[in-house]
């Protein structure tokens, strides 16, 4: 049987599509997306823009016959989409990076207490879907009154339009603040507090089963066969983890896209942690622990545009490499932070400027800031060891930079293995489709990686070792400053 699968990753900055046949990429395409920020703490996207990019990306993957055997979709999690009676979006989607619901989070926490965090396995922040639902009910009540269906995550919306099925995978559901993580069901007390009927929420699926068939209309738009099995794979973190390390437990892996983080699939079930997020693993198996950086590639793009305007990535990397290791300490949190600290008011900061500081050093400091943060996240993981010689798999578009990979190896004092940098989530979706169809499961990227590409810590490791603690202390030292900037005193005039 031909095993080619059309896989799609509907991310924040782009929708990526590929036709995969085993480890071979037969065709691929990518369509960029824009994040709208009408206010500093807001982050929104149009669900219609997701669909248009989805159609364009899939159509950009033309291959010879035969047609794919399935369509598997993964992508960004924790997006709130409200649909009306006709299935149209009522307002733009509130994204995982949207932090407007600060006051609403406080009231929900006061109402539900610690039982909320224990049930969901996580300490909620203002990006919690539950808090966002409360914000909509208080600020846009007409939108909630018109809602006939709640969709969670961009893959859920694409599956809804493609197959007329309202579903949500368990990995995505466990990021929302709405899921009882132990039972794998929606948690009734939070729904009651929100006044949301469970019937509005999508059906929960395990992330590796056929949840519908491609309808005739969408099939015509996509150029795919009508009736094609549609698989809602695990959300992007779950798909990337499955794509990177398969079912291997306690193998930390790094993903660097617009956002980023360090995750591990484990059988341990730790209690809620302020700076770590616990998700149900792919297929409902085990737990994924992740420390998420809200701005990774986004911070590098900002730094390149700001410090090195007009430079492409290769030129910017060359200038940063020439600068050598810096004594600048940067916090990369341009839009709040989840890990290594949970602080929605956090902002980016650069400490250590001198009259001689160059643009290349500033750009490199952004890379180093991401690497320091990843090392600090790794220290929070259960069973973290000060000495671990296992290579850390690294994927994601921002990870294509050889310099950034080397800096991460130096700062983390661990070998780094670049693994299918652009395709980890797509491989995870492919594996989900194979399981759903009862076909042989393709290998994970780690199983096929070229170990010769491993980057080991170099001579700069000792330079960074001396600064790790100083970087970690910055979060706490600057927390009062971040709070003051978030809520400044009113300006008075004589």
Image: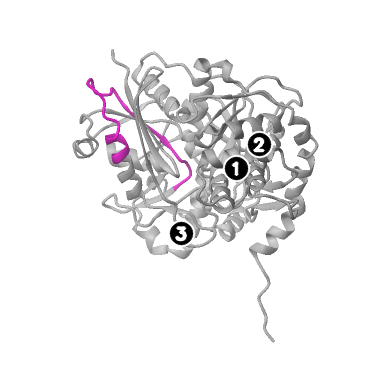
Instruction: Estimate the x, y position of residue 67 in percent, counting from the top left.
Output: 24, 23
Q: Position of residue 481 (x, y in %)?
A: 72, 60
Q: CA distance from mark 3 to mark 1?
A: 26 Å
Mark 2 crowd level (few <14, some 14–19, many ≥20, 10 Å Cα): many
Residue at horizontal 72%, vertical 49%? Answer: 475
Q: Nearer the viewer, residue 289 or 336?
A: 336
Q: Quadrant of residue 286?
A: top right
Specify whether residue 302 is painted magenta: no
Q: Nearer the viewer, mark 2 or mark 3?
A: 2
Q: How is the image coloured?
A: one colour
Sequence-wise, which precedes: disc 2 or disc 3? 3
Picture layout, residue 154 above or below residue 138: above
Quarter holding the C terminus? Answer: bottom right
Q: Which residue is mark 1?
A: 293
Residue furthest bottom as drawn:
494
Q: CA distance from mark 2 to mark 3?
A: 34 Å
Q: In the rendered image, which residue does mark 3 sit on?
A: 136
The boundaries of the magenta stretch are 55-79
User: At which x and y percent is residue 65?
Assistant: 22, 21
Does any portion of residue 240 appear in the rendered image?
yes
- Determine whether label 1 and label 2 are within 8 Å by CB: yes
Q: Which mark is residue 419?
A: none
Label 2, on which residue? 374
Mark 2–mark 3 contact, CB under 8 Å? no
């Amino acid at each position: 049987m031909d095993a080619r699968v059309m896989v799609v990753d509907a991310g924040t900055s782009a929708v990526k599509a590929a036709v995969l046949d085993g480890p071979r990429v037969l065709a691929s395409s990518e369509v960029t997306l824009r994040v709208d920020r009408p206010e500093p703490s807001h982050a929104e996207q149009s669900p219609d823009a997701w669909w248009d990019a989805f159609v364009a990306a899939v159509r950009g993957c033309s291959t010879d016959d035969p047609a794919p055997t399935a369509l598997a979709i993964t992508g960004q999690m924790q997006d709130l989409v409200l649909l009306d009676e006709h299935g149209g979006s009522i307002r733009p989607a509130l994204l995982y990076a949207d932090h407007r619901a600060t006051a609403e989070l406080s009231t929900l926490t006061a109402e539900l207490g610690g039982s909320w965090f224990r049930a969901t396995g996580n300490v909620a922040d203002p990006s919690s879907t539950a808090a966002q639902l409360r914000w909509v009910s208080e600020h846009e009540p007409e939108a909630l009154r018109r809602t006939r269906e709640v969709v969670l995550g961009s893959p859920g919306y694409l599956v809804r339009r493609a197959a007329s099925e309202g579903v949500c995978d368990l990995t995505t559901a466990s990021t929302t603040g709405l899921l009882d993580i132990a039972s794998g069901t929606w948690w009734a007390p939070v729904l009651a507090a929100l006044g949301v009927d469970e019937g509005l929420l999508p059906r929960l699926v395990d992330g590796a089963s056929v949840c519908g068939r491609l309808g005739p209309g969408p099939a015509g738009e996509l150029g795919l066969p009508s009736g094609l099995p549609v698989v809602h794979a695990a959300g992007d973190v779950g798909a990337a983890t499955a794509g990177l390390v398969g079912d291997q437990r306690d193998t930390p892996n790094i993903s660097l896209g617009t956002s980023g983080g360090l995750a591990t699939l484990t059988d341990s079930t730790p209690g809620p942690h302020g700076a770590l997020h616990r998700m149900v693993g792919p297929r409902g198996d085990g737990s994924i622990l992740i420390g998420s950086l809200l701005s990774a590639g986004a911070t590098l793009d900002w730094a390149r545009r700001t410090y090195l305007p007009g430079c492409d990535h290769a030129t910017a990397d060359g200038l940063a490499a020439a600068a050598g290791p810096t004594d600048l300490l940067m916090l990369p949190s341009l839009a709040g932070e989840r890990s290594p600290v949970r602080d929605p008011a956090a902002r980016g900061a650069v400490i250590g400027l001198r009259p001689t500081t160059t643009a290349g050093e500033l750009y490199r400091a952004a890379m180093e800031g991401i690497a320091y943060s990843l090392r600090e996240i790794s220290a929070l993981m259960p069973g973290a060891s000060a000495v671990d010689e296992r290579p850390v798999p690294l994927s994601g578009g921002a990870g294509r930079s050889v310099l950034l990979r080397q800096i991460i190896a130096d700062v983390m004092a661990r070998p780094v293995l670049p693994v299918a940098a652009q395709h980890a989530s797509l491989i995870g979706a492919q594996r989900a489709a194979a399981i759903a169809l009862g076909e042989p499961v393709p290998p994970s990227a780690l199983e096929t990686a070229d170990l010769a590409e491993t980057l080991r810590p170099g001579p700069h490791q000792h330079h960074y070792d001396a600064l790790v603690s100083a970087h970690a202390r910055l979060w706490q030292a600057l927390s009062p400053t971040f709070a003051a900037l978030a809520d400044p005193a009113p300006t008075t005039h004589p």
